[in-house]
Structure formats: C-alpha cells, structure tokens
Image (cartoon, rainbow, N blue to C red):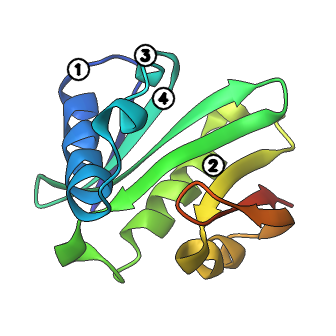
Amino acid sequence: MKIERTDALNDIYQDARSIRQAVFVGEQGIDPQLEFDGTDGQATHYVAYVQNQPVATARATVTDHGVHIQRVATLAAFRHRGYAKNVLQAILDDERYAGQTRFYLGAQQTAVGLYQTLGFQQFGQPFMEVAFATLIWC
C-alpha cells in the first residue's frame, strides 16, 4: 500500500472523488451537492493505493480550530484491512501540520472506535448529519 497526497484537483484528487462518490453518494445516499460542497480546492487530499488501485481517502484543511479531517472513506471491498487508519495516520504524521496540536473530525457513530484507536476522543454530544459525533485528537 502507498499513500499519495495532493493540494491540486488532479488525478489523485479524482481518485479520492471516485471513492467518495461510491461510498457517500452510492452507498449512503448523500446528495452529491452536499458531498461535493465546493471546498475540495482548499483541502489536501490523501488516497491509499493497493496495487495502483485507489481504495481509501480522506481530506484535511487547516482552520482556526486546528486540522479538520473530513471525507474519510474506504471502498466496500477493502474495508476492515486498516487502509483508512493508515490514511489517517499519514495525516497526523504529515510534516505540513507540524506544530498543530488539534486535529478534529465529525465521525459517523459506526466509525468512532476506529478514530479512538488513533487517540481521538469524543467531544460533545452526537449530532445529526448522518449520525455523526465530534472527535478531537489528543
């Protein structure tokens, strides 16, 4: 497995987009206009590849509150193999975020355990956006 990242809307981004299309729009029924909200150009996109096939993705954006991780997704055929966890670890280890002390994300309730294995802790009460909880990295 290798992980690539990009700040451009290039081929790596297109691979991230195709994973998100399959997972969020295709499987979960998210409205494409909500999923592709016009902010992708402001984010760094990470994609995990297995034998040159894109299998997992996430994006990160630096905000006033820290590094905001979003759009974490793994294709169905590749789940439960640690690919999303590796993508998240790549974000946490990325030298561009050196000095950042706060990473945060909204997690679907079914994925909270994954994030907790990386040191995230739930913050506040769950909220409705397809049953999400806010987690921060400690």
SS of the residue at dot 3? helix
Is disc 4 in contact with disc 2, using a CB cutoff of under 8 Å?
Answer: no
Q: Read off the residue under disc 1.
A: 10
Cα distance in 3D space between marks 1 and 4: 11 Å
Q: Read off the residue under disc 4.
A: 44
Q: Read off the residue under disc 2.
A: 93
Height in image: 69 above or below 1? above
Mark closest to the chain's N terminus, 4 or 2: 4
Amino acid type of the residue tagged 3 in the rendering: Gly
Task: Give the camera-side residue of 61 and 122.
Answer: 122
Amino acid type of the residue tagged 1 in the rendering: Asn
At 24% from the left and 33% from the top, the residue drawn is 12
Amino acid type of the residue tagged 4 in the rendering: Thr
At 58% from the left and 54% from the top, the residue drawn is 129
Q: Quadrant of the C terminus?
A: bottom right
Circle 2 Cα neighbour tier, 10 Å, few/some/many (<14 / 14–19 / ≥20) = few
At 29% from the left and 48% from the top, the residue drawn is 20
